[in-house]
Image (tube, helix red, strand yellow):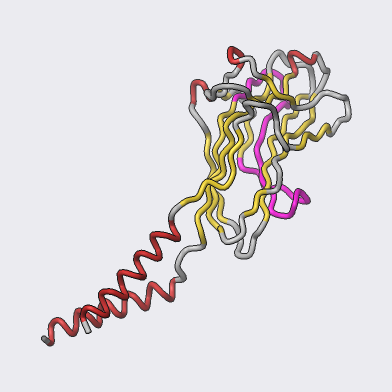
Amino acid sequence: MKKTVLSFLMLIFLGATVNASADVIFTETFDSGIGNWTVEDYNADGYTWEHNNNLSWNFTGGSGGFATADSNMSWANDWYDALISPVIDVTGYNKITVSANISYQHDVDGGYADVSYSVDNGTTWTPLQEWTATFQGKDEGPVSWNITLDAGTTDFMLSFEYYQPAWSYYEYQVDNVSVDASAVPVPSALWLLGAGLAGFAGLRRRQD
């Protein structure tokens, strides 16, 4: 009986360990371009996100190419643009970790750079972080955000938005985007069952 109980408990713990492990479900290095990401030119001025492979201009802390919304090089009077990921399948996952190398240099009042996510194919967006002061990944390191999704969520998207109400000497850069996901954890009822069986095993041991 003791061996049976202990074997069952081990299966519970092993199952929990498997479910807690993270899978890398999406990566983008932007080394060869912006791939199948979408750019949104909200103010329709013809200037928007693009690929840059000039390594000396990558201030994110990443290497190789990167995506950039570059006010300086465009000479545009203002920017309101977003870089949006393809739809990422998160079926069976509810714990998400997003990481990226970021560079944003701020020099215009009212300007900002942000990152947000959507679980309804881009209809609504939930903010993760907004920068209104200079942040450079080459000095600060990569940024990461932990997200808990509602049960049954199947789709996930990211948006990197840049707003600049006047010409800026600087830009917003994004590199090495990664999405890690963990499966739905073992239900609490199963943990309670395991705890009860552990207590039962202890009781049998004392009786023996």
Q: Residue at x 54, y 38 (%)?
A: 99
Residue 104 magenta-highlighted? yes
Q: Residue at x 62, y 22 (%)?
A: 65
- Left or right of residue 20: residue 175: right
Quarter assignment of residue 158: top right
Residue 71 spot, x, y in % from top left: 75, 18
Q: Which residue lies most toward the left here?
A: 208
Q: Which residue lies most toward the bottom here?
A: 207
- Left or right of residue 168: residue 55: left
Residue 56 spot, x, y in % from top left: 58, 12
Q: How many marks?
A: 0
User: Which quarter of the image is occupied by the C terminus?
Assistant: bottom left
Q: Out of 118 and 109, give the one closest to the viewer.
A: 118
- Left or right of residue 76: residue 113: left
Q: Residue at x 64, y 60 (%)?
A: 153
Q: Residue at x 79, y 26 (%)?
A: 48
User: Which quarter of the image is occupied by the N terminus?
Assistant: bottom left
Quarter assignment of residue 18: bottom left
Q: Out of 78 and 32, give the one closest to the viewer.
A: 32
Residue 132's place in the image compared with 96, above or below, is above
Residue 101 spot, x, y in % from top left: 56, 30
Residue 105 magenta-highlighted? yes
Residue 54 spot, x, y in % from top left: 63, 15
Q: Which residues are magenta?
A: 103-128
Residue 18's place in the image compared with 74, above or below, is below
